Image (cartoon, rainbow, N blue to C red):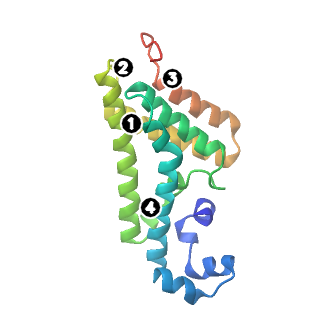
Amino acid sequence: MEICSTDGLDGLSVGRLAGDLGISKGNITVLFGSKEQLQLATLDAAEAVFRAHVVDEALAGPPGLPRLRSVCEHYVAYLETRVFPGGCFMARTFAEARALSPAVCERVVGMFVRWRVFLSDLVRSAQRRGHLASYAADTLGLELVALQQAAHLALALGDDVGFASARGAMVARLSEPHDERA
């Protein structure tokens, strides 16, 4: 996962992993069979790490707008704490999806769609509780994904102003003049 966060999924190979771990390629091949299977297993593991750092704690909190805000705050914390040296594993992977094998690309696209739909569903939950009524849920969900991607890129490039701007834009999107920050 660390290799992929900096070099992308295409930078992960059986030979590279074996070399980094100081073991034979045969040992890696026995475990995964192929580069594609290694990439798919890495995606599964990275998604579990992402869920643990960004989603699980937020889901334990109150529903509606507080939960949506918490997910976004946890995402920013996930970036800032550098869970992976290259920043957000998912953001890095989304950017290279079309260059990967069809099976890996399909998995990455599925992860992206699930994340976008998850955020949109959280917006709808907030709307059912009287918040964010002026937004189209699917549009706001996509805007949040875009802002998260921007935060990831800014952090990866060392652009503190860009990172703060992306974070501030997320906060602004989740605030309304009549909203009492509930």
Residue labelled with disc 4? 97
The C terminus appears in which quarter of the rendering? top left
Q: CA distance from mark 1 to mark 4?
A: 20 Å
Q: Which of disc 3 and disc 2 is earlier in sequence?
A: 2
Residue 27, above or below 176: below
Q: Which of disc 2 and disc 1 is earlier in sequence?
A: 2
Is 133 in front, or is 154? 133
Query: Label 3 near label 2: C-beta < 8 Å?
Result: no
Circle 3 residues within 10 Å: few <14, some 14–19, many ≥20: few
Tell me the element at label 4.
helix
Residue labelled with disc 3? 172
Q: Amino acid at mark 3?
A: Ala
Residue labelled with disc 1? 141
Is 46 in front, or is 52? 52
Q: Amino acid at mark 2?
A: His
Q: Which of disc 2 and disc 4 is earlier in sequence?
A: 4
The disc placed on residue 131 is 2
Q: Which of disc 4 and disc 3 is earlier in sequence?
A: 4
Q: Please name the residue shown 44% across and 16% down the image.
A: 176
Residue 101, above or below 74: below
Residue 64 left/right relative to 168: left
Please state the horizontal and vertical placement of residue 81, each as a whole percent of the image.
66, 45
Q: Which residue in the rendered view is the most extreme toward the left?
A: 128
